[in-house]
Every structure is written in C-alpha cells, then in structure tokens.
Image (tube, helix red, strand yellow):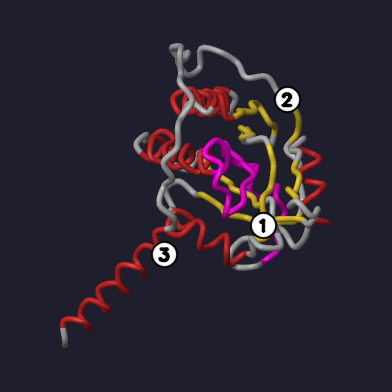
Amino acid sequence: MTAARLAASLWALAASAALAAGPEVPLVQRPVQGFVANPPGSYALPVIQPATDGVVLEGDRVPRRLARYTHGAVTLLSFVYTYCTDPTGCPLAYATFEDLRQRVAARPALQGQVRFVSLSFDPVHDTPDAMRLYGGGRARSAAVPWHFLTTYSMRFLKPILDGYGQDVEVERDADGRPTRAITHMLKVFLIDQGGMVREIYSSAFLHPEVMLNDIETLVLQDRAHAP
C-alpha cells in the first residue's frame, strides 16, 4: 500500500470513528456558580406543571409519544437544533448534558434512574437521520440513555413548544427572507419519574453540580415513596 493510500485509509477510519462518536463536545463558557449547592434530599422541588406530550421521532423513524421519554425516569429535556452556534444556547446544553451524563454514570445508585432528551426545534432540517448523527455514540449509551428526537413537522412540534412555554422565532435576512438561524431562550426542563416538571433551568443557571443534586433529590424522593 502506498503512503498516500495508507494516509487516506487512516483518515477514513478516523472520520468514521468521529462520526460514530457524535460531535465533539463544544467549548462553551459555563455560567459561574457563586454559591454552594444544597446537598441532595435536603430540600424539595415543587411541581411546576405536567410534562407536555406529543408525537416524536427517533433515529429509527418510528412515531412515539413524547411521554415515553418523560415518564419512568428522572429526565432532563432540552430543545435544540443541530447547527446552532450560540455559545449560550444549544452548545451549552449539549456540553452540560455530556458533563452530567458522565457524573450520573459514575454513581451506581443512579443507574437506570436518569435519561437525557434533546428535541429539535427544526423538523425540516433536523430529520431523524440528522439527529441520529448529532447524537452519535451518545445516543446508544445503555448506562445513561440520551435520546435525540425530532418531529414530523412544525404542526406536530408547535403544541409541544407551546406546552413547555418555549418561544422560538426564525431570524430573517435584510430582505425579510427566513434564514436557518433560530432565536430562542435556552431552557432545560427537569422532569420527575411521574412526568411532572420540577425545575426549569436557564442558561445562567446550568450548573452541573446543582442539577445533579436536583436529580438525586428526585431519585431519593421516589425511593422514599416506593411501597
């Protein structure tokens, strides 16, 4: 094999491995946590609202109820789009989820108790295949499931966005034509095992230590009420 062909083969293998692993965790500027987080179980998280349901699609293109992904485990849900570059938006949510996924995986008591869900704002461009590639190997983690979802169309997505109070607007160019840029306020929803929203984090409050303690608090609460 020539040196050029060997180099090309190695490049192809590296590219395939990178694609399978999913995108690099983006470099983001995390919000500063200027306080000490309360220990898990030392506080209560009030019920805010029921988690909104709807029809969603995963990489296998099989339509399922969103409730399938918001019941039965403590869930962190965020709305994203795959080509977002705002460092205080989707990339921050992605990096925070990956940080938390590793922390959860390191705690045996949380195994099988937690999941992550990323649902696209843009069903036109973020097809099931696009979301599958966006998730890469993270979408196939059995220890800490991370589901990358989309919908058939805006007709299916809008009731979900409305239910969560998630405003979104497509930016327009100088001629008034819609672009692919989407304006939105980052929100991450913490949902308990029964499908109730218990906390809503904005970009200024995405502190992994605090969020992990909130997750553990809900797991402890569920165990305390188990028969």
In the image, what residue type sits under mark 3?
A: Leu
In front: 218, or 165? 165
The mark found on residue 150 in the picture is 1
- Toward the viewer: 205 or 67? 205
**What's the distance in space between the residues labelled 3 and 1, CA to CA?**
19 Å
N-terminal label among 3 and 1: 3
Give the left or right position of residue 133, taking residue 149 as reference.
left
* Circle 3 crowding by C-alpha within 10 Å: few under 14, some 14–19, many from 20: some
Count of numbered circles on the image: 3
- The numbered mark, 2 or 3, whose residue comes first in the sequence reads 3
Label 1 sits on what residue type?
A: Thr
Query: Toward which corner of the image does residue 45 lie, by quadrant?
Result: top right
Image quadrant for the C terminus? top right
Of circles 2 and 3, the one toward us is 3
63 left or right of 211 in image:
right
SS at mark 2 in the image = loop
| Residue occupied by mark 2 | 48
- Which mark lies nearer to you, 3 or 1? 3
Residue span colored magenta: 62-90
Where residue 223 appears, as percent x and y from the top left, is 53, 27
Which element carries disc 1, helix, strand or loop? Answer: loop
Q: Nearer the viewer, mark 2 or mark 1?
A: 1
Q: Which residue is the site of mark 3?
A: 19
Q: Amino acid at mark 2?
A: Ile
Where residue 18 appears, as percent x and y from the top left, is 37, 62
